[in-house]
Structure formats: structure tokens, C-alpha cells
Image (cartoon, rainbow, N blue to C red):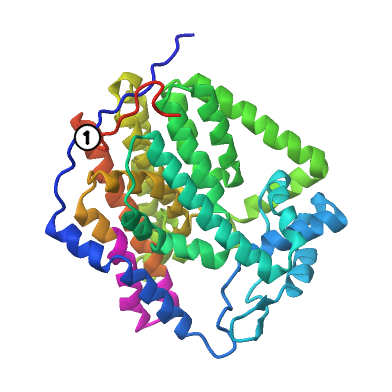
Amino acid sequence: MQKEKPESLSLIQSPPSLSRVRKWLDFVWILVPVAFLATALGLLQPGRSCAYLGTDFRGYYASAQIALKYGFSQVYDQELQNEFQDNLLMHCPDGSFSPPLLHVSMPYLPVFVLLFVPLTLFGYTTSYLFFSILNLVVLAGYLLRFYKALGIKPSFYKLLEWFVCLPVLSNLVLGQMNIFLVVCFGEFILASLNGKQVRSGGWLAGMMIKPYTLILLLPGLAVSQRWRVLFGFAAGVVTVFGGSILLAGVDGIIASLNLAIRFAGSLIHTGPSMMNWRALALNLKALLPDWLSWGIAIFGMAVVTAIILREWYQFKPEKGNRFFLLALSTLAATFTLSWHSHFYLMLLLIPILASMDHLHQIPSSLLAVWVFAPLGLYVLFSFKDENLARNMLGLGYFGFNLILLTWAIRYQRRGTSPPKLEAHAGVVQ
């Protein structure tokens, strides 16, 4: 088997000066999401100042409690989940205790429940705060690691900008675990750039936390014949399932898979607020016949899939920095295609986008769309209906992903694609 060459990206020596648009954007970037969050919290009824805090984390914490008391296979018993979650009250800053607004499920494999077992050493509110701080620390540390590996000198003001964007804030509010996906996907990129194909596949297996994030990556690797990456992935998956079987047995694996399948069906009622073709169809149904709404969505899914697979098929390792943008476009396309795709998954894009932003290799207009468009749609429609506003927020990020996908593909095909980074063999660590 022929060993693939590591990717090669050329170093930019003198980044272009900032445009007026970007200087203005730097001025307001931090204010917009913070103002949005403050307004959203201010609209809550008295006594519900932290009603949405830890919505998803409550499920993680309860799952760890259940695993310790009844075994990992019982984590997928929803009645048991409801019982444990009802006892988890968030201690709010105003002195009140907030019960859960809704019960959540735990669709992840048993081995990932193990990550939250240490947090049960603390009370629920304390562990949520600790987990939120840990998310920020890991994100900061990983961005600095990513920059160092690519030879980027970080700007701490730009780091702050990316820290206060809505996907980061929403992950903190909900207590989501997407930071683990950020690390796994980032290491997949760095290992691939450095020619460590088996290692990159191993990191990709970590994304089995949410397997739908792989629906385009795995076929793309197959059509580009990156067999060593897929071998590393397969080895990692065997490890994940092996650990899960040891913890919960075969019955626990089956229960977790059944629950994951239900997440694509009637169990989740937030489909219209997602950032995918499914959400577009569900929202278009208010204006168009069902057959036409779904026809548009299915056609869009087919086009996006064909575009990404074609890019992977035509990709050659010696083409250098095309891989960086190929990973970006694949992830953006995945968000639109996946059946379950909330906007807080956009956290996975931040290492790539922030790296390109640090080198001024991404248009200010695209960054302005990232900051303003989804939030603008939310504010505009919130005057009419809160549920509709949430749907428009999701569709705003859906539109951004399509714009990002189009932009990245165009750069890939030019042959002189950003980001112009240094990543020769042995440089990326």
C-alpha cells in the first residue's frame, strides 16, 4: 500500500490589512451576542431566571447517577431518567431552585456516559458550573494548540470574539458536550495534514458520540480511497463498542441504538428549528404543499451530497491546502444534510474559521453573516411569534452553512485556496 504524502500548506508572510467592514465588525461583534443573551434572559418570567441552564447537562448528570446506582444498561430507561432528572434542581442566582422545563434522553453509547461519572462527586448546580468552565478552558486550550500546530500567532481579542459567538454561548447554557467533538475533529485535521492517516481515523472514531456528524466524512474518505484513515476509524469504533459492551452488555448497546433511532423520529419535536434541509421542508409546509416542500429538501440533499463526494473523489493529497477547506465544506454540508442538526453544532467549525480569521483569509462579509444574519432573523420574527423566531434562527444557520459551503468549494477549485498556512511534514505536531 502506497503511503500518502502529508498535506502541504504555504505560509502567508504578510496578511492583508483589515478592511473597513472588518474594523467595524470587530467593534460590534462582542456586543451583539451578549446583548441577545441578556435580552433573552430578561424576557424570562420571574423565578425562571435560569430555567434553560443545563437543559442537556441534566440528562448527562442523571445518566451518570443511574449508571452508578443501577448499571449503565439502565441509562436508556426513560422513566428512570425522568425520576432522576426531576430531583435535579438548578440553584439560581436569585436564590430560587429551577426544576427541569423538560426531560431529555441520553442517546449516546455507554462508554460516553463514563465521561460524566466523576461529576457526580459534586452537587448538580456545582457540577454544571464546573462543566461549563471546563468547556471554556478546553476550547481556549485547544484553539491555542490548533494555532501552534499551524504556525499561527494568536490574537487574544479575536479569540474573545469567537468565544462570545452564539454557538459557544448556547453550548454553555445548555451544558452540551460538543467540545469533545471539537477536539476529535480538530485532531483528525491535524493528523491528516501531518500524514498520520491511521491516527486521524482513530480521532474520527471519537465523533461516534454523535454519529450523524460522519454521514459525509466516511463516504468521502471511501471515494478518495483513504483506506488507512478508515482502518484507524474502524479500530477506534471497535474500541468504543468494546468498552460499551463491557459497561452495559449487548442489551445496553441495543437500547442505546434504539433510542438513537428514535431521535430521528417522533421523540424530538424541534425539527422545524434545526439547521438542515429537513427544517426547511417542515417550515415550507406552511406555504407549499407537502410534496413540493419535501421535493425541494430531497433535491437539495442530493445536490449537496453529490458536490461533496465529487470533491472528495477529485481530491489528491499532493494538492496541499485544499484538504483544510475540504474538511470545512464537508462539515458545513453535513450540518445541512443530517436529520438531527441543531445550531450549537456550529461549535465544530470554530477552530477552522478562527484560524482563517487570524490570517485574514476569510471575507469580512462572510463573518458578518455569521454574526448578524441568524440573530437578525430571530429578532425580526420574535415580534410575531417566539416559536417562528426559533425556527428562523435555525434556518439562518442553515443558510450560512450553504453560503460557507459555496465559498469553500469555489476556493478549492481555484487552486490557490486559503488558509495559507505552514503545515509541512513534521511541523504539525
Residue 71 visible in the displayed image? yes
- Membership of 290 in magenta stretch: no
The residue under the point 45% across, 53% down is 347
Residue 126 rendering spot, x and y as whole percentages: 67, 68
Instruction: Tell me the residue at 46%/39% (across/down).
Output: 186
Q: Which residue is mark 1?
A: 12
Q: Looking at the rendering, which quadrant does residue 32 occupy? A: bottom left
User: How far from the left and from the top, in percent, is residue 141?
Assistant: 48, 47
Res 176 visible: no
User: Residue, x 50% and y 85% (percent of image)?
Assistant: 44
- Quarter in which the C terminus is drawn: top left
Residue 338 screen position, x and y as percent: 47, 49
User: Does residue 106 lie above or below 94 as drawn?
Assistant: above
Q: Which residues are magenta?
A: 370-390
Question: Would residue 25 be found to the left or right of residue 114 on screen?
Answer: left
- Magenta residues, dominant SS class: helix
Q: Nearer the viewer, residue 67 or 396?
A: 67
Q: Quadrant of residue 4?
A: top left
Residue 102 appears left or right of 429: right
Residue farthest along the bottom direction in this orientation: 46
Across and down, in percent, residue 308 comes to 36, 36
